[in-house]
Amino acid sequence: MKKREGTSVIGDYIPLSIATLSIIIFGIINICAMASGQKEGSIPLALFKLLPTLISPIVLVLTAHANRYGFLLGGFNSLLYAATFFMEGLFFSLFTAVAVSFPVQVFSFFHWSRNRRDEDSEEVALKSFGVKGNILMILAMTAVWAICYFFIGDLIASQNYKLFDTIGFVTGMACTFIAAFRYVESMYINFVCIVCSVLTWVSITVNDPSSVNYLINSLYSLYTVIQASFIWTKLYIKQKRELAEAQVEALHE
């Protein structure tokens, strides 16, 4: 397999190692604290909550470099996250993980597999909505968020996190769907979603320090989505340039 464009030790592997080691260290501290407190069933629960946060950094690196296997692994990891969202009362996030993230990411893997630029490369042809398409998408997401926040949020969302949970729900769904169809804007929308995730887990961790792994993971997610935005944009521009050059060459033949 060819090396992914933009992959580097400093940009990928060092942050990945720091995030993973931090998650493991705080996970062990949390488990030891629970063991000393002798809370029945707390250790298996802590181990279960730790598992998806250890898988996520791998998913994030793959996704940042537009690698289709990030969708496959991320889809199954979303089911592990769903259990944690249920325990924390993040019901919009729970619905997104089970009903949207899992099936759409698995679909994304197969869709991207069929749209590789050639059989020897993992690179897929990326697309863009354009200015008008982006304006319409922003208006649509704003309308859906307003419905969720003002009409549905009081019924199923935790009042402590309703704003962040509903914004994360709408942007997370939009990102998941448009990433499946290879739109570069998915990473920009994902940035908003991850910012909401960071703020949510900051609030949760203040009251429940055992959730620090999820805060670390969300901070690492913020780093990778910024990285992904640059990588996907650069890749899209390169592909657009190559397509234009190919069309010019075809006219001269």
Image: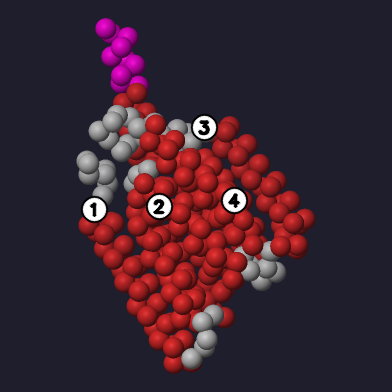
Rendered residue at 48%/79% (across/down) = 210
Reading the image, the residue beneath label 4 is 99
- Amino acid type for the residue under numbered disc 3: Gly
Residue 247 on the magenta span: yes
Magenta stretch bounds = 244-253
Reading the image, the residue beneath label 3 is 130
Residue 8 marker: 1
- Amino acid type for the residue under numbered disc 4: Ala
Horizontal side of residue 107 vs 114, given as left or right: right
Q: Residues within 10 Å of mark 1 (few under 14, many from 20)?
A: few
Give how far apart the Cα atoms at labels 2 and 1 are.
Answer: 22 Å
Q: Quadrant of residue 20?
A: bottom left
Give the SS element for disc 3. helix
Q: Is residue 22 above or below residue 152?
A: below
Secondary structure character of the magenta stretch overall: helix
Q: Are marks 2 and 4 in contact (CB under 8 Å)?
A: no
